[in-house]
Image: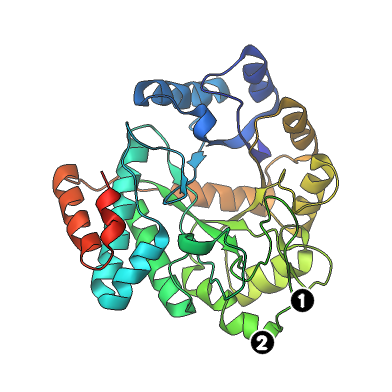
């Protein structure tokens, strides 16, 4: 088993993808819109991915709601963006947390029915004025305590639905003035401010089983390397100051923020302290380069990976129709666009 998570090219496995997976044995998989057709076919793909490896490998997806939603109508509901929970929270704290938890439980029910057992959610990013809109309404608010509270409720809802949460983008993407999918964001804020704002939102969530890094430079701590490939950030901030103990995965290693080949990026992320490297685009040449540089999952990284999967619990029973009705009532109490939820 090797220390990477891979995407695949389309809605079904090709012969060359099967051969690649058997040869390289990635820790897990991640799915995107290009892999999705209708529920039965997607469930079949998930089953085939695991059958190909011969084990119950984790299958990830980004199902946040709002702009980031890989499963969409007509087969799945549209969920609101994270800012909706923040709007309700400002009106009624308990209702905001209840909506966030229930919405996440409903998402988990959608995913569990497909065999998908990991959702790249919640975000604990704290945006500021002037930051790039790549986070925008995906965020729950602009105060660390509020963001942490809503993120915790979402993580709880996912867990209750039998799905593991992935905390992102640690140690924070909220101040980024560029979209890391395209280029490298550089944040020059003083460390003392970062500690009490951006990093503070992640501390109450440090016991979550999985987290994803931010491709962001924090010049006050490491003036050149983005967090994903910075040993200083990983060890001093993520592991020490924030106190995150779980499995640390990179954000997508193929994103435009990072320099060098994907193989060089893979080596750098592992050397910095990431346990697992995430590669998403399904391009075979890049997949092979990542697999060639990803080490066998061993030692502390293997222990954390095993502990993360062991944290998954059986889903709690939920009456979907009643839960959706309750969710709509909560959403419409303070956020009228929730009427778009199906």
| Circle 2 residues within 10 Å: few <14, some 14–19, many ≥20 | few
Using the image as rendered, state which of residue 328 and residue 168 is in the foreground: 328
**Residue 124 can be seen, yes or no:** yes
Residue for badge 1: 221
What residue appears at the point 81 percent right and 52 percent down from the top-left corner? 268
Using the image as rendered, state which of residue 43 and residue 208 is in the foreground: 43
The correct choice, above or below, for 83 with respect to 44 in the image is below
Query: 325 left or right of 8?
Result: left
> In x, y percent, where is residue 227?
72, 63
Q: What is the distance, in whole Å, between disc 1 and disc 2 at their CAs? A: 11 Å
User: In the picture, residue 37 is in which quadrant?
Assistant: top left
Res. 192 mark: 2
Could you tell which of marks 1 and 2 lies nearer the N-terminus?
Answer: 2
> In x, y percent, where is residue 255?
71, 47
Please state, as top left, top right, bottom left or bottom right, where the C terminus lies in the image.
Answer: top left
Query: 118 left or right of 29?
Result: left
**Residue 314 can be seen, yes or no:** no
What residue appears at the point 61 percent right and 65 percent down from the top-left corner? 173
């Amino acid at each position: 088993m090797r220390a990477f998570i891979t995407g695949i090219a389309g809605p079904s496995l090709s012969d060359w993808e099967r051969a690649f997976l058997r040869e390289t044995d990635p820790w897990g998989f991640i799915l995107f819109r290009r892999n999705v057709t209708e529920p039965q076919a997607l469930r079949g793909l998930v089953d085939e991915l695991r059958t190909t490896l011969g084990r119950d490998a984790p299958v990830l997806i980004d199902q946040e709601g709002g702009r980031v939603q890989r499963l969409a109508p007509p087969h799945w509901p549209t969920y609101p963006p994270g800012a909706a929970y923040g709007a309700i929270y400002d009106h009624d704290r308990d209702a905001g947390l209840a909506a966030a938890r229930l919405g996440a439980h409903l998402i988990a029910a959608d995913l569990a029915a497909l065999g998908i057992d990991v959702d790249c959610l919640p975000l604990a990013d704290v945006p500021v004025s002037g930051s790039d809109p790549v986070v925008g309404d995906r965020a729950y608010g602009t105060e660390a305590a509020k963001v942490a509270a809503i993120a915790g409720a979402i993580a709880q809802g996912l867990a209750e639905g039998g799905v593991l949460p992935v905390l992102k983008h640690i140690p924070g993407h909220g101040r980024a003035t560029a979209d890391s999918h395209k280029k490298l964001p550089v944040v020059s804020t003083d460390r003392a401010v970062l500690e009490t704002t951006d990093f503070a939102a992640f501390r109450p969530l440090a016991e979550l089983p999985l987290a994803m890094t931010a491709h962001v430079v924090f010049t006050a701590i490491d003036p050149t390397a983005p967090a994903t490939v910075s040993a200083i950030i990983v060890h001093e901030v993520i592991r020490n100051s924030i106190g995150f103990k779980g499995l640390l995965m990179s954000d997508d290693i193929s994103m435009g923020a990072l320099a060098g080949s994907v193989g060089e990026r893979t080596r750098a992320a592992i050397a910095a302290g990431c346990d697992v490297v995430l590669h998403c685009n399904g391009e075979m040449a890049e997949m092979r380069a990542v697999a060639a540089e990803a080490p066998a999952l061993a030692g502390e990284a293997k222990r954390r990976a095993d502990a993360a999967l062991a944290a998954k619990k059986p889903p709690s029973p939920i009456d979907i129709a009643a839960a959706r009705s309750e969710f709509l009532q909560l959403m419409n109490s303070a956020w009228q666009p929730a009427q778009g939820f199906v």
